[in-house]
Image (cartoon, rainbow, N blue to C red):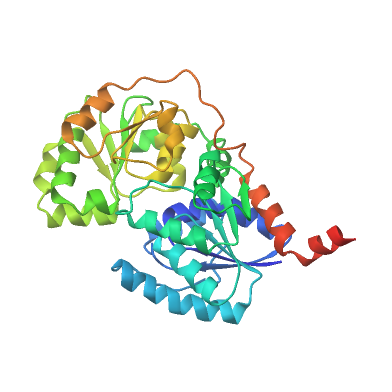
């Protein structure tokens, strides 16, 4: 079986790592990096630490508007799919890379398999929501992380080719969290276990709005613990553009650090008092490690984290964020709603059953 996998952003590298390992044990994988995240801190270091093979192709599209970025990828990917003739194109999550790969494969008449299918925030103003809905409706095989995701697809009339496999990010989190308790990383960042909050902010809805970004900074400044803020390049640029440098400097409890490696991210997250984020993936990772989360959005596709009491939606209002953080309580239970940490193996088995000639022949016999 020949699988062409397309990745392009930090969350996709994390998701692809266990699937790459499972695929390459018995099959051919062609790995394509769109270049959507392109600098060392957001790309290369993740390939190195996660043990992902060097990409066979790098499109190097870089940053830009949604339309320009997606359009550049579309043309290049279509040519690549026609040249490589894979049995299936494997895409991850909800980025512009995901949308471009799904569209290009569908146009080239190559089957599409979508990892992390069925997620819905029900907010169509989010580019990620548009991407994930479109790709789900283009896909031949849909790998869902949760029962809610399966239900979302059914509500849209999608039931064929749907597989409940669990969450591949849990595979990666468990693999890396076993290596260290994070003591060395905490010493480097100058914090003590349980004595700080970890923060990430990168969504366009927050970082591209001066008022919302300022509100988040002011909220962080009012918290009673240090805030380790791993500052995304996009957010850093907007802080400078909006003239919010002084507001950030005045927040003396906020410790700004560059984007961190996956190993450091795991160490900082699992030892934090809470996570403050607008990231979808990190909401789940907080749940994996039993860390309370305050989400800087008004909705989430990871509804289980909210329903089970581990996540509070605070939006970007200063007072609401502070109230949510100060009101954190740790639930007494944490069910395995995201699977057993073997999602990658389940994905490969399903692909084999659908696309591997050897598997199909053995079924016929």
**In this picture, residue 200 sits left or right of residue 54:** left
Relative placement, left or right, of 191 versus 247 is: right
Q: Residue furthest top?
A: 332
Q: Position of residue 140 (x, y in %)?
A: 60, 62
Q: Quadrant of residue 87?
A: bottom right
Asked whether the viewer can see residue 41, the reply is: no
- State the quadrant of the N terminus: bottom right
Residue 155 against residue 272 in the figure, above or below: below
Give the side of residue 114 with respect to residue 269, left or right.
right
Q: Measuring 46% from the left and 34% from the top, which residue is drawn there?
A: 304
Q: Nearer the viewer, residue 328 or 162?
A: 162
Q: Using residue 173 as the reference point, say whether residue 259 is left or right of it.
A: left
Residue 359 found in image quarter: bottom right
- Counting every numbered tag in the picture gives 0
Occupied quadrant, residue 196: top left
Q: Does residue 135 lie above or below 258 as drawn?
A: below
Spot occupied by residue 79 in the image (x, y as percentages of width and height): 52, 81
Front residue (pair 296, 269): 296
Query: Where's residue 269, x and y in %?
Result: 41, 35
**Vertical placement of residue 147 versus 42, above or below:** above
Position of the C terminus by quadrant: bottom right
């Amino acid at each position: 079986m020949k699988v062409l996998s397309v990745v392009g952003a930090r969350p996709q590298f994390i998701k692809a790592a266990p699937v790459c390992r499972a695929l390459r044990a018995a099959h051919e994988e062609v790995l394509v990096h769109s270049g959507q995240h392109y600098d060392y801190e957001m790309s290369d270091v993740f390939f190195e630490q996660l043990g992902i093979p060097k990409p066979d192709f790098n499109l190097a599209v870089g940053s830009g508007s949604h339309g320009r970025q997606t359009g550049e990828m579309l043309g290049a990917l279509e040519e690549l799919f026609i040249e490589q003739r894979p049995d299936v194109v494997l895409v991850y999550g909800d980025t512009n890379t995901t949308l471009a790969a799904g569209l290009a494969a569908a146009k080239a008449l190559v089957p599409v398999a979508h990892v992390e299918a069925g997620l819905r925030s029900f907010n169509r103003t989010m580019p990620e929501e548009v991407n994930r809905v479109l790709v789900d409706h283009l896909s031949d095989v849909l790998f869902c992380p949760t029962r809610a995701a399966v239900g979302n697809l059914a509500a849209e009339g999608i039931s064929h080719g749907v597989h409940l496999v669990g969450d591949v990010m849990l595979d990666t989190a468990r693999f890396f969290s076993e290596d260290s308790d994070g003591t060395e990383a905490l010493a480097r960042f100058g914090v003590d276990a349980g004595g700080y909050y970890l923060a990430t902010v990168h969504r366009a809805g927050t970082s591209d709005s001066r008022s919302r970004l300022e509100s988040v900074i002011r909220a962080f400044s009012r918290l009673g613990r240090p805030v380790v803020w791993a500052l995304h390049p996009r957010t850093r640029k907007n802080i400078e553009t909006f003239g919010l440098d002084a507001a950030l400097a005045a927040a003396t409890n906020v410790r700004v650090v560059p984007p961190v490696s996956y190993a450091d991210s795991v160490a900082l997250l699992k030892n934090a008092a809470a996570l403050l984020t607008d990231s979808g993936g990190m909401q789940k990772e907080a749940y994996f490690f039993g860390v309370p989360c305050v989400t800087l959005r008004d909705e989430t596709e990871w509804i289980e984290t909210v329903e089970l009491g581990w996540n509070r939606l605070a939006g970007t209002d200063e007072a609401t964020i502070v109230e949510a953080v100060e009101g954190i309580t740790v639930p007494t239970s944490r069910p395995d709603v995201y699977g057993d940490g073997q999602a990658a193996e389940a994905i490969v088995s399903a692909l084999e059953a659908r696309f591997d000639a050897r598997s199909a022949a053995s079924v016929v016999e």
